Amino acid sequence: MDYVSTRGRAPALDFAGVTLAGLASDGGLYVPRTWPRFTHEEIEAFAGLPYAELAARVMQPFVAGSLSAERLRELTAEAYGRFAHAAVTPLVQLDEQNWLLELFHGPTLAFKDVALQLLGLLFEEFLERSGRNLTIVGATSGDTGSAAIDAVAGRAGVQVFMLHPKGRVSDVQRRQMTTVLAPNIHNIALEDASFDDAQAIVKKMFADATMTDRFAIGAVNSINWARLMAQVVYYFAAALQLGAPHRPVAFSVPTGNFGDVFAGYVAAQMGLPIARLIVATNVNDILHRALSAGDYSAGEVTPTAAPSMDIQVSSNFERLLFDVGGRDGIALAGQMAGFEATRAMRLTNAQREGAAALFSSARADAAHMARAMRWAWDDAGQVIDPHTAIGLHAARASGLAPQVPVVTLATAHPAKFPAAVERATGQCPPLPARVGDLFGREERVTDLPGSYEAVAAYVAAHAEPKGKAGRT
Ligand SMILES: *Cc1c(COP(=O)(O)O)cnc(C)c1O
């Protein structure tokens, strides 16, 4: 399998290449040249497989040429062996139509672990082969940072510089990052910055030759293809349990950077019968406006009780625009340059129609979110987190026919956001024992001004040069 950039000018790379590269050199994102497709019979035969085995089967076409089927199976067994639930991503029924897919049984209590536990192992595998050092530079709205740090702490050849907007992540989220004291982990709190500002700094570093000449800069954000690939698996796992491929299933996905829901789109391209993908946003609703009215224009970020979705610029939306817009990288590069200059663009008719075939969208404000948390507790006995509540609100408002099961992705454990959960439900969710005494541990974090120059200087002073093999 080889991978092409959404902006048409970067060289095609194999799976190992895209895993280490992160962003393409033309500023685009890598996507597979073609979508592998399973037959109805092949999907039928996946039913009942253990999660790690299903993961190896679903991902095999994407890693072909870089990993053997056997090696991939070893890596998925190791990655998913660290989850606290034997089913890895269990399904819970809420009512006749609605289900929760619990994606928070990994070490840092959010769905990001599903992809990052595997990505940490992939980095180690590919770096060992090449003899290179990798400098991960990432931006986090809270959950990517902790999941990436857990996955990479203490691993050889990798250093992590994780930027978070100071004061805009929850205490649990911050402590999950800053209490990891391994020498290859650097936490940076950006002053007076939003997640979008942090993400823009990261993207700028990929385009800065003075940095990329010295350091092999890699990504753990969902701009990294391997993350999306790992997330495709749980769409298969959930749909198979609900009767796929004989019965189509809908998914409601609390969305920020459009990575998780794009993985659902990939599952559909691979042949999984998906009735609908519901993009659920909070009041930071650029994706809702884009999908419902064709208006992709970024406003100011409003902080909410669902901070991992407080995003205005959704990186992975570019992958969808590329695929539904005829895969014309040069045209898309022009469209994205326009967006970068003005922070606004209109979707083309082809992009709007292509997206509308599978996606719908909904926006939840604070009252909708609280009501969904209360409904889940009062009517279904489930304590859910604010992000999941936004998805559940959208699922229950979707108007889908009653025979179509609707799976809301439960993206975080409620104990990550106890204040908002308690306000809405009166329940104070306890932290699971596996995260330990988070509030008793020492924190280590560096405060920096929210400017590119300050971050680049810090990384240059602390990172390891790329090493003997050079940048591929
Ligand atoms: C990251 C995150 C999201 C948003 O996922 P995207 O892939 O960025 O759309 C939603 N909920 C939680 C809890 C998250 O951590």
Image: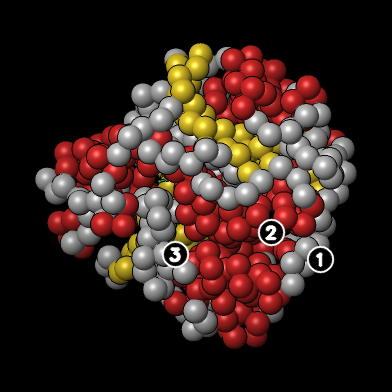
First along the sequence among labels 1 and 2: 1
Is residue 310 rendered to the left or right of residue 456? left
Determine if residue 140 is in view. Answer: yes
Q: Nearer the viewer, residue 81 or 198?
A: 81
First along the sequence among labels 3 and 1: 1
Residue 112 rendering spot, x and y as whole percentages: 48, 51
**Which residue lies under the disc numbered 3?**
82
For the point 36% across and 24% down, which residue is it? Answer: 167
**Label 1 Cα neighbours within 10 Å, binned few <14 / some 14-19 / many ≥20:** few
Q: Secondary structure at mark 3?
A: loop
Q: Nearer the viewer, residue 267 or 406?
A: 267
Task: Say if mark 2 contacts mark 3, CB within 8 Å.
Answer: no
**Label 2 Cα neighbours within 10 Å, binned few <14 / some 14-19 / many ≥20:** some
**Which residue lies under the disc numbered 1?**
65
Q: Which residue type carries mark 1?
A: Gly
For the point 41% across and 30% down, which residue is it? Answer: 444
Is the residue 350 above or below the residue 111 in the image? above
Give me the C-alpha separation between circle 1 and circle 2: 14 Å
Q: Nearer the viewer, residue 34 or 417?
A: 417
Label disc, if present, on residue 110 of the rendered structure: none
